[in-house]
């Protein structure tokens, strides 16, 4: 039984995962270098001070602890990148285990775990959920080997 649909969905989601890893890494690196710039920090602080929607205690926290905010954003970004890398590894395990119809249940479980780590409602996770459903639902056709010996091509009926 061919598992082309599951493999294609897995490969497409792996490509999306790679793209998101690259983009989020560049975003985190760019944000951390930008937030270290004193000119940006001064402009950011002046924007916070002039914004009427921000409460005074929040303004005080942002102006006194800019390193805490920077470290928090940096940590969240790298945790997100790590989760997507783990999702990519699980996705590749699923693709390898579904190739040539080896272990469709294992592949389905790996696709579901990869989808959860990729983000619950992202396009990557939706593709992985569809591939997992296909892994669980599609069954190999039943082959009757005992009927092959009943009739011979050389013998008349």
Image (cartoon, helix red, strand yellow):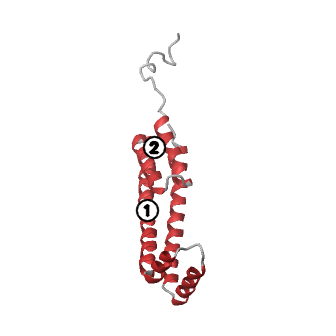
Is 32 rendered above or below residue 104?
Answer: below
Q: CA distance from mark 1 to mark 2?
A: 25 Å
The label on residue 100 is 2
Mark 1 falls on what kind of element? helix
Viewer-nearest residue: 24 or 91: 24
x, y (%) of residue 24?
Answer: 51, 69
Q: Counting other residues with Cα less than 10 Å from the Cα at mark 1, is it few (<14), some (14-19), or many (20 or more)?
A: many
As drawn, the residue found furthest toward the bottom would be 39
Q: Earlier in the sequence, mark 1 or mark 2?
A: 1
Residue 71, disc: none
Front in this rendered view, residue 154 or 76:
76
Q: Position of residue 89 (x, y in %)?
A: 42, 57
Crowd rating for badge 2 (residues with CA inside 10 Å; few <14, some 14–19, many 20+) = some
From the viewer's perspective, is the residue at label 1 or at label 2 nearer?
1
Q: Which residue is mark 1?
A: 85
Q: Quadrant of residue 108?
A: top left
């Amino acid at each position: 039984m061919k598992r082309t649909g599951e493999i294609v969905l897995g490969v497409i989601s792996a490509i999306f995962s790679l793209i998101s890893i690259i983009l989020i890494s560049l975003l985190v690196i760019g944000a951390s270098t930008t937030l270290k710039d004193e000119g940006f920090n001064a402009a950011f602080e002046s924007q916070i001070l002039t914004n009427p929607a921000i409460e005074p205690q929040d303004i005080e926290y942002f102006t006194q602890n800019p390193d805490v905010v920077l470290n928090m954003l940096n940590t969240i970004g790298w945790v997100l990148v790590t989760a997507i890398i783990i999702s990519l590894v699980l996705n590749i395990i699923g693709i390898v285990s579904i190739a040539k119809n080896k272990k469709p249940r294992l592949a389905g479980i790996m696709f579901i775990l990869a989808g959860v780590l990729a983000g619950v409602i992202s396009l990557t996770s939706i593709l992985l959920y569809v591939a997992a459903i296909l892994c669980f639902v599609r069954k190999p056709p039943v082959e009757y080997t005992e009927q092959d010996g009943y009739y011979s091509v050389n013998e008349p009926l």
